[in-house]
């Protein structure tokens, strides 16, 4: 039985016998083990049903915890409102201008309908925007449209008002399009209604408000933070089950081709399925939120977790091929040999699988080192899933196999002749094998590394035909860019910016310089106190901007608090310039910001300091810094894995030899990423934090088997050959199954999942190449050079 694994293990010490006794519990008590696992599954289902999983897709998930820039963003948001908690409604009329008596009445009615909810703080649009308009007999400063003004303004006056709004920078492209056929309503949501729990309510309110106006020659485009995040969640919720099911199907096909038995398919899938269920229940209990990358969790847990079951089943088949232990009693009952083989397989694989599970999970557990909450939460969930998959595999599979009829005695050969030939070729000329591996690596790096780009766009994760993407494109075509970015101008010496006409003139010159910047268009529009002051000053008969402080004070008195509250950070003593920008990607955005800073230096100089803020800046800065986070995670993972391998084998030389072939797949993946055109972003950067842990799995199994062969007295090269010929089959099987499982992510229409699936499949392929070619060549070369054990 498992408690007494036979003569082959008799001399391996009390520690190994204790391990065998502990591992043998599921085999000795299979029904009790399966019952306990079933109760755990029921508890997990009850937990998920009762608590559920909350989702968080806000900017907080992108910005490193404790980031002072984000703290500043939140402080400004408390004073001016969050730029990621606004729903934008754009109303498009195909043929009629909005600034007609009938159009103005509809715009006012829309404003009231959109504002008629407790969750709405205010609606800024063509009716409520504070305007400064010379109407001939008088100068109007106040809301653009009210019931009283509609009664007082005739059709020509409304047409002049519309032309004025389309012409002035403060309103053009924000509340009205250049052709007058599109108007925009910014529905600012109260902070108490911020977050994923309220997005559905925001969307429902907007839909109810617009319903009475639909089908009257008006098309509505709805975008902004709450609607976009709500759409993202709906998209991922609908798509995740499809490719999770695809992963199960591909895993089933790969397992069937590998083991050619119903048990070889059903048991690993049952184990990883239970592990996934327990993982989600644990995620619910500790309240780790779902995020944009969480849709990959089911596939990653299923695929990464199945490796332990594969190694256990492969070793079980190999032990079944061996003759019964010499200590077995004559006339032993049928199945005794199978039970004995299961015991030996458990003892042989449990320790190696423990280390591989630890190394794999460490890659995920170290993702919090990136500082990015989205990656941190994802890493903790998947890391826990890998550990749970190990525990479930080493309890469920032995218990089930102990109850199933023993397999027929027709096992595969212990040594695969093709792998045996590969091992001899690699160890016979190790220098050539190493050189060939380096040539492959150099070719990948030379072709791919120069093409790597840190790049992202806000809605680039969704397919081109998704409504969110189509709506964004339609909005940009009619109104220009709609992503929020904010410049703050801090006067030198702490001067009051509302009492500095020269600074105001310089800010106006800065805005003009922004509009004239070369390169791809990023800026769509900007507004500042200078815009409002200039309109009013010209209405009073002046030219340009007020020339002195008394004139400026007079204009500001006319404008009132509404304009100042929008364009001046009174607490911080700075001028505020809200910008609308196009979503041109990380590189274009930072190129624009660099040119903007140069323009600021030319136009404003040392009279003030420029500060950049806003959701768009925070999101792109995170994507720009993702390389640093990825390298940090990889460096920590590298150090931890090296320490674990050293603890396992207690040999510095063997540790160094193990680490080298696992840097190989990481660099291969880096080159492949460039060749495949996969941009380096938060989703794809996960690969660099986990690739080392995943790739080292086969290395640990290889070295454990190699260590066994050395203890049997084989020299380095023959031990490496036999390891390739025996353990190599399980390694190839696992690589085949893992690649098939990761390929399920290619079924997703969510681009981060597609990139992750492609890169992880490439990692698995290059990892098995490193372990079956580069590693045995290094072991053979080290043994040849000094004749000492490697």
Image (cartoon, helix red, strand yellow):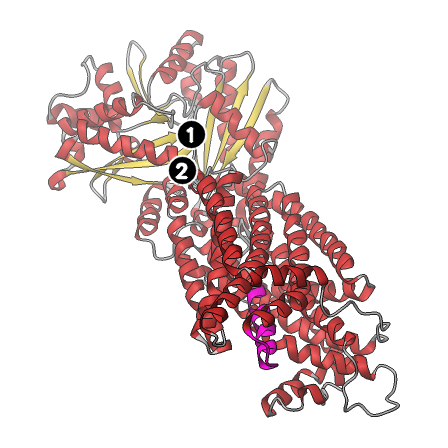
Residue 699 is tagged as none
Residue 764, compared with residue 406, is above or below; it is above
- Image x and y of residue 150, in percent: 44, 17
Where, by quadrant of the figure, is residue 585 drawn?
top left
Q: Is residue 709 magenta?
A: yes
Q: Foreground: 589 or 345? A: 345
**Which residue occupies 20% across, 24% down?**
555
Mark 2 — residue?
A: 586
Separation (CA) of disc 2 from disc 1? 11 Å
Mark 1 — residue?
A: 582
Q: Is residue 13 magenta?
A: no
Q: Which image quarter holds the N terminus?
A: bottom right
In the displayed structure image, the side of residue 373 where residue 567 appears, left or right: left
Which range of residues does the magenta coloring cover? 696-715
Q: Main secondary structure of the magenta part?
A: helix
- Image x and y of residue 780, in percent: 53, 67
Residue 300, compared with residue 169, is above or below; it is below
């Amino acid at each position: 039985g498992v408690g007494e694994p036979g003569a082959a293990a008799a001399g391996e010490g009390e520690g190994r016998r204790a391990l065998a006794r502990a591992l043998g519990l599921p085999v000795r008590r299979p029904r009790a083990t399966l019952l306990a696992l079933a109760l755990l599954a029921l508890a997990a289902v009850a937990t998920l049903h009762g608590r559920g999983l909350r989702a968080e897709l806000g900017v907080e998930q992108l910005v490193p915890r404790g980031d002072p820039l984000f703290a500043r963003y939140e402080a400004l948001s408390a004073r001016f409102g969050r730029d990621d908690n606004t729903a934008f409604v754009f109303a498009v009329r195909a043929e009629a201008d909005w600034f007609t008596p009938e159009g103005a009445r509809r715009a006012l009615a829309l404003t009231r309908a959109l504002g008629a909810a407790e969750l709405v703080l205010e609606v800024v649009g063509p009716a409520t925007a504070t305007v400064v308009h010379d109407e001939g007999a008088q100068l109007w400063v106040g809301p653009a449209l009210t019931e009283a003004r509609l009664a007082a303004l005739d059709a020509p006056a409304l047409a002049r008002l519309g032309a004025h709004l389309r012409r002035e920078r403060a309103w053009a492209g924000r509340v009205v399009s250049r052709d007058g056929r599109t108007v925009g309503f910014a529905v600012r949501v109260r902070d108490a209604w911020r977050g994923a729990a309220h997005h559905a309510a925001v969307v429902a309110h907007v839909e109810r408000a617009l319903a009475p106006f639909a089908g009257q020659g008006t098309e509505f485009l709805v975008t902004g933070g709450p609607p976009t995040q709500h759409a993202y969640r709906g998209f991922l919720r609908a798509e995740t089950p499809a490719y999770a099911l695809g992963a199960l199907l591909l895993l089933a096909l790969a397992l069937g081709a590998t083991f050619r038995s119903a048990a070889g398919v059903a048991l690993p899938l049952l184990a990883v399925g239970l592990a996934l269920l327990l993982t989600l229940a644990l995620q619910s209990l500790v309240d780790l939120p779902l995020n944009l990358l969480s849709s990959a969790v089911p596939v990653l847990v299923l695929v990464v977790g199945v490796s332990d079951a594969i190694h256990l089943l492969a070793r079980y088949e190999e032990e079944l091929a061996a003759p019964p232990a010499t200590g077995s009693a004559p006339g032993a009952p049928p199945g005794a040999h199978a039970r004995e083989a299961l015991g030996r397989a458990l003892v042989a694989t449990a320790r190696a699988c423990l280390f591989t599970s630890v190394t794999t999970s460490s890659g995920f557990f170290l993702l919090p080192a990136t500082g990015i909450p989205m990656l941190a939460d994802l890493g903790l969930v998947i890391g826990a899933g890998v550990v749970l998959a190990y525990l479930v595999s080493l309890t469920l599979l032995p218990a089930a196999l102990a109850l199933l009829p023993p397999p027929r005695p027709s096992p595969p050969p212990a040594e695969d002749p093709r792998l045996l030939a590969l091992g001899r070729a690699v160890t016979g000329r190790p220098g050539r094998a190493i050189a060939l591996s380096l040539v492959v690596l150099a070719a990948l790096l030379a072709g791919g590394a120069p093409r790597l780009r840190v790049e992202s766009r806000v809605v680039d994760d969704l397919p081109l035909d998704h409504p969110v993407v189509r709506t964004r494109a339609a909005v940009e075509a009619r109104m220009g860019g709609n992503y929020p970015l904010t410049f703050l101008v801090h006067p030198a010496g702490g001067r009051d910016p509302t009492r500095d006409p020269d600074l105001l003139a310089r800010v106006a010159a800065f805005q003009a310089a922004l509009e004239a910047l070369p390169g791809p268009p990023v800026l769509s529009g900007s507004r500042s106190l200078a815009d409002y002051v200039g309109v009013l000053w010209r209405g009073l008969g002046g030219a340009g901007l007020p020339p002195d402080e008394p004139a400026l004070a007079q204009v500001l008195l006319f404008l009132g608090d509404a304009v100042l509250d929008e364009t001046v950070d009174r607490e911080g003593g700075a001028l505020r310039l809200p910008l609308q920008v196009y979503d041109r990607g990380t590189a274009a955005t930072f190129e624009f910001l660099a040119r903007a800073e140069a323009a600021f230096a030319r136009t404003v100089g040392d009279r003030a300091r420029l500060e950049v803020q806003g959701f768009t800046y925070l999101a792109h800065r995170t994507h720009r810094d993702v390389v640093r986070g990825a390298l940090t995670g990889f460096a920590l993972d590298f150090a931890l894995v090296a320490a674990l391998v050293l603890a396992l084998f207690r040999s510095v030389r063997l540790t160094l030899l193990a680490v080298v072939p696992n840097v190989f797949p990481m660099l291969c993946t880096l080159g492949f990423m460039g060749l495949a055109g996969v941009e380096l972003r938060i989703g794809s950067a996960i690969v660099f934090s986990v690739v080392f842990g995943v790739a080292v799995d086969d290395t640990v199994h290889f070295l454990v088997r190699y260590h066994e062969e050395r203890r049997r007295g084989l020299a380095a090269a023959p031990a490496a050959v036999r390891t390739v010929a025996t353990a190599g089959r399980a390694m190839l099987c696992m690589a085949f199954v893992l690649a098939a499982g990761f390929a399920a992510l290619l079924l997703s229409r969510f681009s981060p999942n597609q990139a992750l699936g492609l890169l992880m499949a490439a990692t698995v392929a290059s990892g098995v190449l490193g372990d079956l070619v580069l590693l045995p060549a290094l072991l053979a070369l080290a043994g040849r050079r000094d004749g000492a054990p490697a």
